[in-house]
Each structure stands twice: as C-alpha cells, then as structure tokens.
Image (tube, grey):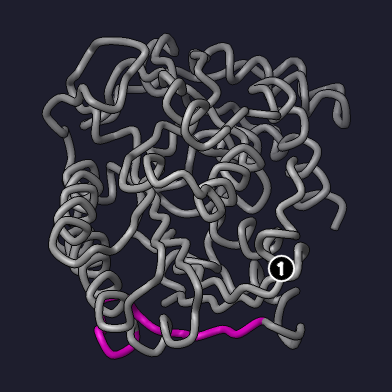
Amino acid sequence: MKDFSKQLSGRHILVTGGAGFIGSNLVEQLLAIGCCVTVLDNFLTGKRENVAPFLGRPGFRLLEGDLRDLECCRQAVDGVDAVLHQGALGSVPRSIANPLETIGCNIQGFVNLVSAVKERGGVRIVYASSSSVYGDNRTLPAREEHIGRQLSPYAISKYADELFAANFHALYGIDFVGLRYFNVYGQRQDPFGPYAAVIPLFAMKMLKGERPVINGDGLISRDFTYIANVVQANLLALTVTNPEALNRVYNIACGQTTTLNELFLALRDGLSAFRPELHEIEPVHGPERQGDILHSQADITLAREYLGYRPEVTVHEGLRLAAEWYYKKWLVS
C-alpha cells in the first residue's frame, strides 16, 4: 500500500462506526501512520473488542454515542480535520425486517453528521455508500452514472445519502467523496447474529464441521473486495488534491465476479490448509434471499482515474488471508 504518512501524519480524523468491521481496520491503519483518531460508535453492531487494542494509545479517543443525536455529532466533529463516515446499520435483510431503524441510522444519522460539519466548516467527508444502490440495473459491469430502482430500505438509505451529499455540497460547499463498496470481507468481519455476512458465516460453519447454506443455486455472483483495498480507497479519498476528484461517487471493488459456489470452494481450500478434513465438507442449498440482486460487478475506471485506486489484493489472495485469520481467531486464540 502507498505510504500515506507524509500526507496524514498528525491530522485528526473522525471515524464514525469505528468499532465496526471496516471502521476498525481504518482506525488501525490511521494510527499506524501517525494520525489522531476519534471514533464515534453506538455499539449497536460495532464490537468493543475491535477498539480495545487502541484504548489508551496517544491520539486515540473513543466517543460512545449515536449519529441520531445531533449534539453527539457536534462533539464528534469538534477539532477534526476530516471524517471517514462508516457508521450505518448494514444488511439488506435487516432493513426489510426493520425499515424504520435503518432509515433512522443511515439517513437521519448521515444528515446529522453533515449538519454538524456544516456548522464547523472546512472538513472533507469521505462516506461509505453501497453497491446495493444499483438495484435492478442489470447492465454489468456497473458504472456510477447508471443505477436502477433500489430493492430494499438499506439500498434506498445509501442512495439518499448520496443525494444529500450532492445537495449539501451545492448549498454549503462541503466536499464529499462517496465510496460504493462491493461486498467487503476480511479480518474482524462478524460471523454471528441473524445478519452475518456470507464469508465469515461460511468459515465459521466449516470450522465447526458444519455444512454452510448457500442461498439459491449458488450461481449468484458478487464483486468480493478484500478489506485492505477498501482501506486504500479511503486513504486515497482523504488525500486526493485534484478538485475534479471531489464530490463524486466511486465504485470500490476488484472489478471481477465470483459466484457463491466458487466462493465456497476457494474458502474451503483456504481453511483446508489448516484443517485438511474440511475439504470433504459440501454446502447445502437453501432458498434465495428477498431483496437480493442476482449479479454484481463494478467498473472501477473512475476510481482508478481520479483517486489512483488499484486493488492490491485479489479475491483469492484475500480469501486465503481471511481463512488464516478466521482459523487463528476462532480456534487458536
């Protein structure tokens, strides 16, 4: 990864959702390059264990609070130089089961944060959007300017954030960079709970000697993206100086597709390096999930051109790294 220390060392960065999977990986990297970091998290889905290693370190501050509280947002942005906004309530199925909570966290929370930044002024916001905004658009690879109808409250909430970002820039001059993540995976991704992501869920099942459930026939495909690539994209968005690169939304992915069947086989191979008997496990096929799109693949041309983004970790290398981390985390440590 590019050395960002000259550009970011000494800067104070707010990471909302910093106790979450993506947020905590960002915090770890920011501290490593000499940033001061404030984390705002309500621990609704974030894990205290994810930020425990940072507690007491110089330059780190943990603020336990909720984005839906405007005063809390004001406290969080006080004194910061930039914001990495990762705080959101994820999961398409969760949003279908409880749309009001998703809307409150993801839309009201975003508007509160941006309003607090507006009052303070002069702070760039890099925020997490989602590939789910493409909805029923079936043209692949997906390009940023062509989206369809969103298929879940979660997808709608992420698209609403993009619209608010464009509006607040036009009205108040705040600079934004939106990052549409495509199926991020890697260390610290939670395998537990009813809305666990597919890769850690598969890994946990196999390490327990159980057969993972693949929703549908396994031919659904995604542009799976290793966490290191997402961290790189966020740091590039923080440091980019070209004015034309700002106030855009970018696909952050690898630019290739992997079916769930292929994903299962690759992850099984990775885990079998530590537990050879796992190579005999076969998946179970269950019903398709409501609100899921069938295929997803990103065109990453704009991120390459404007941000200098280059995915450094391939899907299969990322799955190998993830399998090693899951094994050590759940069976060794």
Q: Give the residue displayed 53% in from the left and 67% down from the top.
A: 18
Q: Is residue 247 left or right of residue 13?
A: left
Residue 4 image point, x, y percent: 71, 53
Q: Nearer the viewer, residue 209 or 291?
A: 291
- Against 157, is 88 above or below? below
Q: In this view, does 98 lie above or below 290?
A: below
The residue located at (43%, 87%) in the rendering is 78
Q: Which residue is drawn at 76% across and 63% down?
A: 33
Region of the chain picked out in magenta, as a range: 60-72
Confirm whether the magenta stretch covers residue 74: no
Q: How crowded is mark 1: few (under 14 residues within 10 Å), some or many (20 or more)?
A: some
**x then y, percent, for residue 8:** 66, 63
> Does the magenta segment cover residue 68?
yes
Of the 4 image quadrants, the one containing the C terminus is: bottom right
Vertical relation: 68 (above or below) 152: below
Foreground residue, 289 or 11?
A: 11
Quadrant assignment for the N terminus? top right
Residue 283 location, quadrant: top right
Please identify the quarter of the rendering in which residue 19 is found.
Answer: bottom right
Q: Which of 104 and 230 is in front in this view?
A: 230
> Which residue is labeled 1 in the image?
9
Asked where in the image residue 155 lies, by quadrant, the reply is: top left
Secondary structure beneath dot 1 equals loop
Q: What amino acid does circle 1 point to?
A: Ser
> Percent position (x, y) of residue 266?
68, 18
Q: Is residue 29 above or below residue 221?
A: below
Q: Is residue 135 left or right of residue 140?
A: left
Task: Please state the total of marks drawn on the protein image.
Answer: 1
What residue is shown at x 59% (from left), y 26% (from top)? 211
**Residue 45 x, y percent position in the rendering:** 44, 64
